[in-house]
Amino acid sequence: MNYSLKQAKHGVIETICGCMYSGKTEELLRQLKRCEYAKQNYQVFKPKIDSRYSDTEVSTHNLQKVPSVVIESPEEIYQHLKHDTQVVGIDEAQFFTPEIVEVVSKLANHGRRVLVAGLDTDWQGLPFGPMPHLLAISDIIRKQYAVCMVCGDSATKTQRLVDNSDDILVGSFNMYEARCRDHFDPELSLRKSKAPQQELNI
């Protein structure tokens, strides 16, 4: 490998998780803003599949944005990593392959602070992609909560509203709602779907 991971003495993995509309990306951007105040160099990465609000920026649902490097595989982070980067932000981590776990670990082991944001569960309420492993190896976990769009209580589930059961369906307000456990119905999309398959949310 040609890249250099060497950085500071102590790294850390911080994972921000929750359902859709819980403010995961907003919290990621808040942490990055604090890095600016501390005069720390940071880079942000996001998966190519997420182009809902911008092709080249990480964006919240209310359109707060920060420039990012768009990648298809976790290993591409090494290719774009700058030698003076102290903080690495990664959004929508649930969409990456399991290799993201090794990449994040290496970055932290070589002294970088790694901020990872992603959905912890999918549209069926099941653990999403590499997120369970990332949570297990994290030094700090920030669990975000949304508001149930049925009753107004705290929400931890992502409700898919459309008749689609693909594993991955990237969407936003017209396709998903935040729901509490009582009002979460993982069978809703399956009942609507004409050709049941299986799928995940963002």
Image (cartoon, helix red, strand yellow):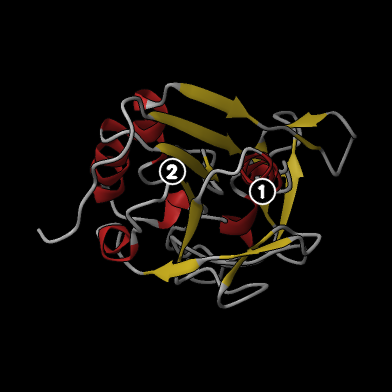
Near mark 2 (Cα within 10 A), the count class, few <14, some 14-19 or many ≥20, is: many
Q: Which mark is residue 91?
A: none
Residue at image location 59% in from the left, 48% down from the top? 187
Query: Total label count?
Result: 2
Question: Along the horizontal axis of the image, is 144 left or right of 17?
Answer: right
Q: Quadrant of residue 146?
A: top right
**Mark 2 is on which residue type?**
Gln
Residue identifier under label 1: 29
Q: Quadrant of residue 107?
A: top left
**Mark 1 is on which residue type?**
Leu
Question: Along the horizontal axis of the image, is 148 left or right of 4?
Answer: right
Quadrant of the frame with the N terminus: bottom left
Residue 191 placement (x, y as % from top left): 61, 57
Q: Quadrant of residue 101?
A: top left
Residue 136 placement (x, y as % from top left): 37, 24
User: Which residue occupies the foreground of this view, 137 or 40?
Assistant: 40
Q: Is residue 107 above or below residue 63?
A: above
Q: Is residue 154 above or below residue 123?
A: above
Quadrant of the frame with the C terminus: bottom right
Q: Residue placed farthest to the bottom in the image?
A: 55
Element under label 2?
loop
Residue at image location 57% in from the left, 78% down from the top? 55
Q: CA distance from mark 1 to mark 2?
A: 15 Å
Q: Is residue 118 above or below residue 97?
A: above
Residue identifier under label 2: 86
